[in-house]
Amino acid sequence: MTINMKKIFTLCAALLICSLIFGQKQKVTKELLGNHSGSEVYLYTLINKAGNVLKVTNYGARIVRIDVPDKNGTIDNVTVGSEKLASIVKGDAFGGASIGRFANRIANGKFTLDGKEFTLPINNSPNTLHGGRNGWFSKVWSSEIVNSKQAAVRFAYISPDMEEGFPGEVSISVTYTWNDKNEIVIDYAATTNKKTVVNFTNHAYFNLQGVGKGYIFDHILTLKASAYTPLNSTKIPTGEIRSVKATPFDFTTPHPIGYKIGETYENATFQGYDDNYVLDKKEKVKATVYDPESGRVMEVITDQPGLQFYSGNSMMWQKSAGTDSKAVNTRSAFALETQHYPDSPNQALFPTTVLAPGEKFKSRTIYRFSVKK
């Protein structure tokens, strides 16, 4: 091999290595959004091979944007959020955020662990919701870009002993991976130095037509859940595991989200969904949502036992007659939150949410986006 050929070979090899290195780094970019409570808040943009985008921030370890194509190839954002710090902080506290120390409700803000009663702040009277008034959704997490073949960012937070009334110092990490299958892979990992209770979820709101461009009553939902946990008047489970058959909660076969909303059920007008489903263990894909207008499909895969389906009951909701006497549906977003059942620390028959020293909590949830033409 001549000297010139050696130089060319060396140069080509160097260019290949640089392209691999910098190509990987280009999948994730980092931008300073500002300062909150003395900590820097960043926006991370994750781009997969197809050029589709996921944006996340370390304020609340939350998702703020998901750009995916419709059946015509048009890209649009399908999750409610903002890329401006002031709007994120002042907006929906839970939207897109990582929820802890305990997602969902705990009855009367109290639970007993090993004979000791713990009292929590009431922020959803008369109950505690999503970790209390200053849950993890309001914290600035540490963050790092993950060195992997896929675009990924890891957020971490150390929750002090007795934060919001919960015992034990808990170390939690949430890793978002945006892969080339248009999947948001969310990996949770946690440890504690004292026995405690934990329940984590992501609280993203979705509209598959595109945020602000349509409503979700006509989205077709399938839930692989043969049972749900009925609630009392304060949205706390009664302890019963009830079949969904012959109820508005039956999505074991595909139905529009709004197919029973506004009808009479149990002598009252059915107002919508904010309910926990008991997921069927044998099914891999636990939930599927299809929007006929855009052709977008979202599938949910999880190892958690429950899924909270929220139909956006307080998000621009009404059901009224239009000029053509047909119902005008104005719910703007829905949530599918993978988690343990509500009030589990007070429900002996529910799967345990206790985490002890020496144990490591691990969980994975996947939101997969595709198109049906």
Image (cartoon, rainbow, N blue to C red):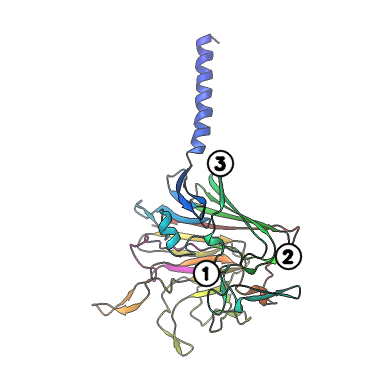
Q: Comparing marks 2 and 1, which lies closer to the viewer?
A: 2
Residue at x 48%, y 62% (from the top left corner): 204
Q: Nearer the viewer, residue 322 or 73?
A: 322
Q: Which residue type does callout 3 highlight?
A: Lys
Q: Which residue is under mark 2?
A: 195
User: What is the distance, in whole Å, between disc 2 and disc 1 at their CAs?
Assistant: 33 Å
Tag of residue 268: none
Quadrant of the rendering where the C terminus is positioned: bottom left
Q: Which residue is under mark 3?
A: 149
- The segment highlighted magenta reads 203-223
Relative height, residue 275 to residue 11 (above, below): below
Q: Earlier in the sequence, mark 3 or mark 2?
A: 3
Q: Nearer the viewer, residue 136 or 149?
A: 136
Residue at disc 2, secondary structure:
loop
Task: Judge from the rendering whether residue 246 lies leftward or rightward of residue 304; answer left or right.
Answer: left
Question: Looking at the magenta stretch, what is its main secondary structure?
Answer: loop
Tag of residue 223: 1
Residue at disc 3, secondary structure:
loop
**Where's residue 166, x and y in %?**
65, 67
Classify mark 2: residues with Cα within 10 Å, few (<14), some (14-19) or many (20+). many
Residue at x 49%, y 25% (from the top left corner): 15
Quarter holding residue 294:
bottom left
Q: Nearer the viewer, residue 287 or 361?
A: 361
Classify mark 3: residues with Cα within 10 Å, few (<14), some (14-19) or many (20+). few
**Where's residue 22, x and y in %?**
50, 34
Quadrant of the rendering where the N terminus is positioned: top right
Residue at x 49%, y 88% (from the top left corner): 266
User: What is the distance, in whole Å, between disc 3 and disc 2 at their CAs?
Assistant: 36 Å
Does residue 98 appear in this view? Answer: no
Quarter holding residue 126:
bottom right
